């Protein structure tokens, strides 16, 4: 009897915990695409986040200096490093979710990291529209602001004059950093697998009480939550310092900034 006993198969860790996920070539392609695009976009995200963090320690000047360094890194290849990987990441993630939902008949749980990613979509799109599309408007008084004219003064002025913009920046930071940290660990594991690095085996206890599983999960997530909270606090301080440093904006610059805000589709609701 003992020779016929087989322990239940161990389940691999996944961002989509729940029923066993289908191991197919389609899922592997979608997962590889999602991870690769995340790794590329992560270069831009890190450089972009560094500027408001620097502002917490050196004000607006420090933010602009870091921004200039970052732009030298990604601006010449903005489409390849920013827009393309972002679009590919979202589309492959959506396709992967639909495929898993179909294969598991909707029983696969959606992880908090995935939920944060979907929440980011309605935060990133207006951010992109306000900071990249509208400043390029050729009509007066915006007059197609070039990247050299459009720095972190804009974010500082937004934080000083429009509280909803401050809330938007901090929400974007909160969900963005959380999504990036969890996703970053997944990308590192993915790269190790591609490189042939074998994961360390951990003891598996079957029928483990839910209370113990919950405690283990909390121990894993607690430092991540702490790090996210720390980054958000530093960015909030950076916004505060940048807001203080925008008291001396020229009248022409203020006119152009106001025109950008007022041309946004949501300007009639948010002032």
Image (tube, rainbow, N blue to C red):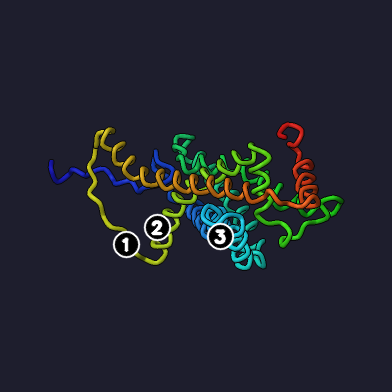
The residue shown at (33%, 41%) is 217
Tell me, yes or no, if residue 220 can be seen here. Answer: yes
For mark 1, does the 10 Å Cα neighbourhood hold few (<14), some (14 to 19), or many (20 or more) residues?
A: few
| Outermost residue, left side | 2
For mark 2, does the 10 Å Cα neighbourhood hold few (<14), some (14 to 19), or many (20 or more) residues?
A: some
Q: Is residue 106 left or right of residue 199?
A: right
Task: Report which residue position mark 1 lands on.
Answer: 198
Task: Report which residue position mark 2 lands on.
Answer: 189
Looking at marks 2 and 3 on the same chain, the residue that comes earlier in the sequence is marked by: 3
Q: Is residue 219 left or right of residue 25?
A: left
Q: Quadrant of residue 66?
A: bottom right
Vertical relation: 119 (above or below) 227: above
Q: Position of residue 38 (x, y in %)?
A: 53, 56
Q: Nearer the viewer, residue 265 or 30?
A: 265
The residue shown at (31%, 36%) is 214
- Foreground mark, 2 or 1? 2
Task: Report which residue position mark 3 lands on.
Answer: 47
Q: Quadrant of residue 74?
A: bottom right
Q: Secondary structure at mark 3?
A: helix
The residue shown at (52%, 43%) is 175
């Amino acid at each position: 009897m003992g020779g016929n006993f087989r322990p239940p198969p161990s389940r691999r860790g996944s961002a989509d915990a729940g029923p066993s996920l289908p191991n197919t070539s389609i899922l592997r392609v979608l997962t590889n695409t999602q991870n690769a695009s995340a790794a590329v976009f992560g270069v831009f995200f890190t450089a972009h986040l560094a500027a408001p963090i620097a502002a917490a320690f050196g004000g607006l000047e420090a933010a602009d200096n870091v921004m200039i360094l970052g732009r030298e890194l990604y601006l010449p290849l903005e489409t390849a490093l920013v827009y393309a990987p972002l679009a590919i990441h979202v589309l492959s993630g959506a396709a992967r979710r639909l495929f898993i939902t179909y294969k598991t008949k909707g029983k696969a749980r959606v992880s908090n990291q995935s939920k944060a990613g979907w929440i980011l979509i309605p935060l990133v799109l207006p951010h992109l529209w306000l900071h990249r599309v509208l400043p390029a408007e050729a009509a007066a008084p915006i007059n197609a602001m070039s990247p050299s004219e459009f720095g972190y003064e804009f974010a500082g002025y937004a934080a000083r004059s429009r509280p909803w913009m401050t809330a938007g920046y901090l929400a974007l930071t909160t969900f963005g950093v959380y999504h990036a940290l969890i996703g970053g660990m997944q990308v590192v594991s993915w790269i190790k697998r591609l490189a042939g690095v074998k994961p360390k085996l951990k003891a598996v206890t079957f029928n483990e009480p839910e209370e113990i599983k919950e405690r283990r999960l909390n121990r894993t997530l607690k430092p991540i939550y702490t790090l996210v909270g720390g980054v958000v606090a530093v960015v909030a301080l950076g916004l505060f310092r940048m807001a203080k440093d925008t008291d001396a904006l020229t009248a022409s610059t203020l006119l152009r900034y106001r025109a950008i805000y007022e041309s946004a589709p949501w300007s009639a609701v948010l002032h």
